[in-house]
Amino acid sequence: MRISKEHIAAHNEEHQADNEAHLAFLDAQLSKQGVTLSLLLDQLKDFQVAIPSWALGAGGTRFGRFSIGGEPGSLEDKLDDVGVIHALTQTAGAISLHIPWDIPKDTAAIKQRAEEHGIVFDAMNSNTFQDQQGQPFSYKHGSLSNSEKASRQLAIDHNIEVIQYGQELGSNALTVWLADGASFPGQNNFRKALQNTQESLHEIYSHLPQDWKLLVEYKPYEPNFYSTVIQDWGTSLMLAEGCGERAHTLVDLGHHLPNTNIEQIVATLMAKGRLGGFHFNDSKYGDDDLTCGSIKPYQLFLIFNELVYGMQNNDAGNPPLAWMIDASHNVKDPIEDLMQSLEAISIAYAQALLVDQQALEEAQRNHDVTMCQEILQRAYRTDVRPIVAAARAMAGGALDPLGLYRKLDVRGQLIGERGKTVVATGL
Ligand code: AOS
Ligand code: ZN
Ligand code: ZN
């Protein structure tokens, strides 16, 4: 273990008085609003977000990639890095794997390593957007949507194989994101491509174990720039409904055209009981995959407000949400970046929990538009960082994860062990 209980205890002792002073002030303010701090802390303490295996190395663009050194070179290393994040934050108790990038050579050993870090296996991700070496049929013109049956079957079989790996590891969800689409008008027959995708997904669904979920991710463009087969939430929902009860839509925050009202999409999907998962990130332009909350924190809060409302009023039977970060960029230490994302997500969640739902409902009923806005903004403008820190410490994490990470020079240690130029598999 790179981060010991002693490290955390010593660090927390140093920061405790300061955090408690902040907390006492907040407690006094919030109790006037009828908020019970201990209840809030309990809810936050249990909150977990999965880390994608591909976010642990420096990302890259088609123009280049700059290594930050000490990056994971194997699945074992990736687990160790999530272990660091989880030990510091106690909110990253799950990893999401990508096959074939993360094929476990020794499943039992991988499971044990994950267990030592307190990590479980979240949704498995299939990969039909790249051809692997020696692959008999190509995905160049599509995978599940391909007009050639042989390519479709290959992609279906790959997804079934991913489910099998996931079963061995104890996962219970398969996320399908397709790059399928067209870059030029006329290239594809829209109707046939959609029909093929529905049939392929249905076939995969029929191999899904009873306690598994199928999560269908949508994205408007990239890598295809004219059309994408699963372009939006409506298409994803339609495909999920066409598969069956255990198929759901997955919302990736970066997969919307600029200014789309994502919180409304969340509310709509939850009303239908079909919101299954989430990929958190932030963006200014498209699928930028930047640190959560770094560009549009108010939007993140509004999304969480819908999520909290949806979970508290879950009459449509949405499954427990598979929360995950999906991030990748070129410049920061990925472990630091992921911890910043976790912090932003926890902050948005805590603020959403502060929303006075009853007062909001009343203001809505009275058409008191000003007050509706006030109620949301009051919650959003509360500095909940001391609460988030306290919940983390209660769970055994650090009051200031980033500070302790730097103080222990974890990246320096990783560079010492793994070298300066290791390149992780995958993106
Ligand atoms: C791609 O844009 C999607 O966000 C995927 O969820 C994910 O990033 C991909 O599967 C990782 O390669
Ligand atoms: Zn995603
Ligand atoms: Zn994406």
Image (tube, helix red, strand yellow):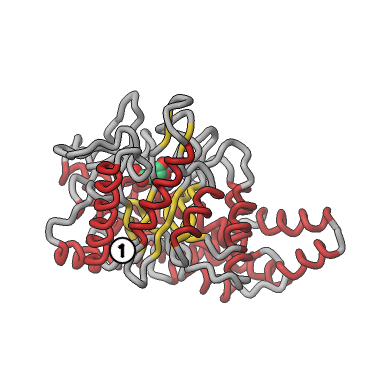
Q: Quadrant of the C terminus?
A: top left
Quarter of the figure with residue 324: bottom left
- Tell me residue 258's x, y (percent): 59, 36
Residue at (33%, 42%) from the top-left corner?
A: 143
**Element at label 1:** loop
- Tell me residue 404's x, y (percent): 36, 54
Label 1 beta carbon less than 8 Å to ligand 1: no
User: Looking at this view, is 34 or 19 the one in front?
Assistant: 34
- Tell me residue 238's x, y (percent): 52, 53
Quarter of the figure with residue 296: top right
How many marks overall? 1
User: Looking at this view, is 409 or 134 the one in front?
Assistant: 134
Q: Residues within 10 Å of mark 1 (few under 14, many from 20)?
A: some
Q: Is residue 219 visible?
A: yes
Q: Is residue 86 left or right of residue 232?
A: left
Label 1 sits on residue? 207
Q: Amino acid at mark 1?
A: His
Q: Is residue 341 left or right of residue 423?
A: right
Q: Is residue 409 visible?
A: no
Residue 123 drawn above or below residue 138: below
User: Looking at this view, is 357 or 239 the one in front?
Assistant: 239
Residue 139 drawn above or below residue 266: above
Residue at (14%, 38%) from the top-left corner?
A: 134
Q: Is residue 223 left or right of residue 153?
A: right
Residue 318 drawn above or below residue 337: below
